[in-house]
Image: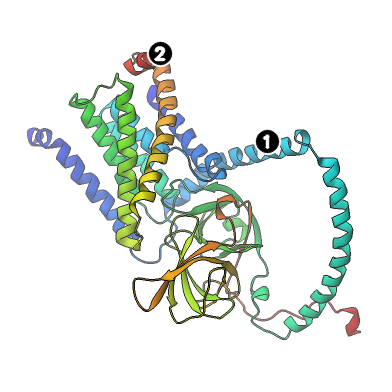
Amino acid sequence: MIFFVAAAAFFALFVLQTSVFGMFGGWGPDAALLAAIFFGVRHNKYPGLQAGILAGLLQDASSHGIIGINLLAKGLCGLASGWLMENHLVDWKDAFTWIALIFIGTAFNQFVVAEYFSAFYDLQTPFWPAFWKCIGQSLINITAGIVMFSALLKIEPLLGGRRSGFTSAID
Amino acid sequence: MNRLFKKYENIILLVCLLIFSAILLSNNARGQRHTTIIERVVLAVVTPFQDVITSGIRNMILGWNQYFYLVGTAKENVTLRKMLREQVFKNNILREELKKYRRVEALVSQSPELALKGGIVAVVVAWDASNSAKTIVVDRGEKDGVKNGMVVINHFGLVGRVVAVSNRDARVLLLTDARSAVDAYVQRTRARAVVVGRNSGQCDVKYLSVKDDVKEGDVLISSGLGGIFPAGLQLGKITLLEAGSSKLFSKAEMLPSTNLDHLEEVIVTQYPLPENKPEAVPEKTESEH
């Protein structure tokens, strides 16, 4: 049940990302990245990979012309998040884990997109503008991620899942 | 076999993902694309939600501005009435100018104004899902007569062109997208250049010869070469001009004449016209009798 609620929540965030946030200059949270990380950490690497691929594909199809780019970036983020949790390399009860994963995921996503445009469209991205863009996007993603993840993990026990350490950490 | 898969599970998953995305990405790189089934489905499924939220927010802003935030309205009303009286007078002069212009226009078979007739007014309902591209979704689709490749403009100039269409909506590739390139003239000197987007608020102006007489603030217009965009549409102003790394071309940047981050309504129009005949002479003016 939590699986469908989380999927619906991320879809709603995606709609907000492309409508409300678009109206105010285009800076919005990356719903696809948050979905990939959430499912990777909470439901293992396969759901993480699948969520990353589906959310990335949805994002690509809403962006015309580059089907596969977000699919690759988000798929890898979902897979890596799940793998890190599976091997106990990060502590999912610690809020810092989520923040670090979102930050690394955002930076990786920006890197993949910049490399693609550099290779296929000869669009060279200068380092410092790209760096500040990455920092800004990470802060937005982290803010949205903390709100989304804490809300989802709080309702998880109500829907049959176990109460998470992250929620306790937030409390 | 199963043990082998278990042992190399992560590597296999990684390789599969890389191959899958490489196939999709190589498919993108094959020149002219058409709207894929995935894009059609996503447009059809996601756009109604985006439409509801966007129009909801717009109505809230409208309600706030029209019913609550009325500070200085009476003073503004007096000023506007004065301006209206002045505009009525100016409007009369312009009507006469317009009639004169139409008579001249009838003599010119390929005028841009003629080519842009039959435009469809569309409202922007969604923006790009990532900040790696610059596209918008408008609320007009195939059922309204919108087709792939149609030109999108507003009263400031060129906005972009339609790149994907579903039954009720269409996706527009903006002038500022890195995949957009428009052949252009500098309006003042007729120097040629190509305006290329760079996924930010500005565009690069490429192939501008160092010998050309160009300065910052010059207006760029579409040249009409290539047959994708009509000639004479305003693109923007040159904001930066400096010597490029090559000795042949200058390095220049352009600020689009339209603020593409805050578009609300646009006109979608066919160019070139399916049947490119000049229309009949417009209404007869009194002076012609």
Disc assigned to residue B20: none
Q: Identify whether B56 is placed above or below B103.
A: above
Circle 1 — which element?
helix
x%, y% of residue B31? 36, 66
Disc assigned to residue B60: 1
Depth check, front residue: B130 or A111:
A111
For the point 41% across and 35% down, the residue is A139
For the point 82% across and 71% down, the residue is B94
Q: Which residue is mark 2?
A: A171
Which subunit holds the residue at mark 1? B
For the point 88% across and 54% down, the residue is B82
Question: As shown in the figure, which amino acid type bears the numbered disc 2?
Answer: Asp
x%, y% of residue A160? 37, 14
In which quarter of the view is residue A37 placed? top left
B278 left or right of A169 in image: right
x%, y% of residue A107? 32, 42
Circle 2 — which element?
loop
B131 left or right of A97 in image: right
x%, y% of residue B86? 87, 61
* CA distance for labels 1 and 2: 34 Å
Question: As shown in the figure, which amino acid type bears the numbered disc 1?
Answer: Met
